[in-house]
Amino acid sequence: MARIDLKSLAHSYFPDPKTDEDYALRRMEHVWEDGGAYALLGPSGCGKTTLLNIISGLLTPSHGQVLFDGKDVTNLAPEDRNIAQVFQFPVIYDTMTVYDNLAFPLRNRGVDEKRVDARVREIAGMLDLTGKLKQKARGLGADEKQTISLGRGLVRDDVSAILFDEPLTVIDPHLKWVLRRKLKEIHNKLRPTMVYVTHDQVEALTFADKVVVMYGGKVVQLGTPQELFENPAHTFVGYFIGSPGMNIMDCKIDDGAAWVDGQRIGLSDRHLAAISKQSGKIELGIRPEFLTLETAGSTKGSDGVEVNIVKVEDLGQYKIATTRFGASEIKVKLGEDEQVVGQSGILRFAPEWTKLYADSQLV
Ligand code: ADP
Ligand code: MG
C-alpha cells in the first residue's frame, strides 16, 4: 500500500485551454496517507473521475505529478502502477464464471494457482459470492455483477491503492448498505489505501475516516466527518454536508457585529478580530442545528433576530422550520417535541457556531 501525493496537478480536456473554466482539475496539491479510508465527495462534474483516472494512469494530466511513496508515476502505464480500480458500472467477463472473474487480476500477474484459490475463496466469502462461484457471470443480475467487480478490485493484496468510482450506483438500497459496511470491514482488516468516490454524503460519512470534498476542480477541504460538520472550510462544504446544509447569508461587519438585512447578529471576539483583516464579499454561515427559534411572546433582547415562520416540516425525529427575514431564508432544526406557535418568532444565533466566510473561505 502506498501514500499518494499530487503535486500541482491540473487537467484540461481541451487541447488549448485558456481560462480556469477550461480545466477539469485546477492545480491540485493533495496527499492521501498510506492505509487511509478516504471518501472523495463532490457534485457531479467537479472532477472526481478525472482525478481517479489520473491516479490509475488511464489519463495523463496536462500539468503536475502523481507520486506513490515519493516515486513519480505520472508517466507510467496503468498496468505498471499497481492500482485496483472499480468503476460505476460492472467491468467483468460475461462468458467467464464468477470464480474466473475474481481470479483474473491474480492470474494476470502470474500468481500461483494455490494462492489464487485461497484469495478468490476469501473474497467470495466476504462478499457472499461463495455459492455462485461456478456460475457464468452472464446470467447474473446487475447487483451481483457489480459485487463481482468489487471483488475483482479487492482480490489482490499487493496493490498500492484501491480506487472506487461511485461503485454502488447500480446497487439496490438495501444491498448498498450491506456492501458499504463490508467495504469498511475489509478496510479495517486489510488496511489498503482506499479512495471511495461518491456524491452521496451519507455514503461518504459512513465509509470514510477522512472525507475529501472537491468543488470546481479543487479540493476545498480534507477532514473527519466531524470537522466538516463543525468547521466547514468553504461555504460549499457547509451547504453540501449536513441535512439540511448550512444557512449562508450575505452580511456586513459594523459596530462589533454582523448585519444581515438590517438585523444585528452578535459574533465572538475571535471572529471579529479575524474578519477585521478581510476584504471582499463576506458571508455568515450557521448550521440549522445551532439556531434556536423562540415563539409565543418571546422578546428580542440584544441578540435576537425577528423572523417570519414560513413553514414547519415534521421529519419524525426532528422538525425543520423555515424562517425568513428580509431576503434571507433560514432553516432551523428543532427537537421532535418543540412547539412552534404563530407565524413569527425570535431567532438566536450561537456566537461560537456563527462562522464568517470571506470569498467563500472560512475566516
Ligand atoms: P465527476 O466524476 O466529478 O462527475 P468528471 O471528472 O467526470 O467529474 O468531469 C469533470 C469535468 O470534465 C466536467 O466538466 C466534464 O464535463 C468534463 N469531462 C469529463 N470527461 C471528459 C471528456 N472525456 N472529454 C471532455 N470533457 C470531459
Ligand atoms: Mg464521475
Image (cartoon, helix red, strand yellow):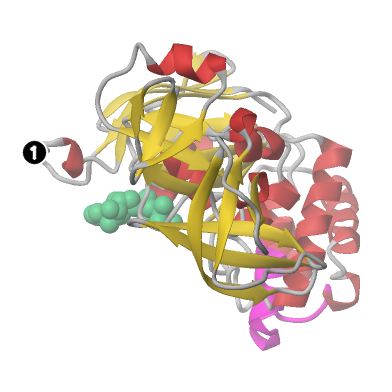
Q: In the image, residue 60 lies at what x, y percent?
A: 32, 36
Image height of 280 relative to 174, above or below: above
**Residue under the image location 60 percent in, 66 percent down:** 321
Residue in front for this viewpoint, 262 or 237: 262
**Residue at image coords 89%, 49%:** 114
- Frontmost residue, 109 versus 251: 251
* Residue 322 drawn above or below residue 58: below
Identify the residue position indicated by label 1 in the image.
Answer: 16
In the image shown, does 44 or 236 lie closer to the viewer? 236
Which residue lies at the image location 45% right of the left edge and 35% below the top edge?
A: 234
Observer able to see residue 97 = no
Q: Main secondary structure of the magenta part?
A: helix
Question: Number of numbered discs present?
Answer: 1
The residue shown at (88%, 59%) is 126
Instruction: Please say whether residue 16 is one of the residues in the magenta stretch.
Output: no
Placement of 69 over or under 145, stated as above or below: above
Where does the magenta region start and end?
133-149
Q: Position of residue 156 (x, y in %)?
A: 73, 44
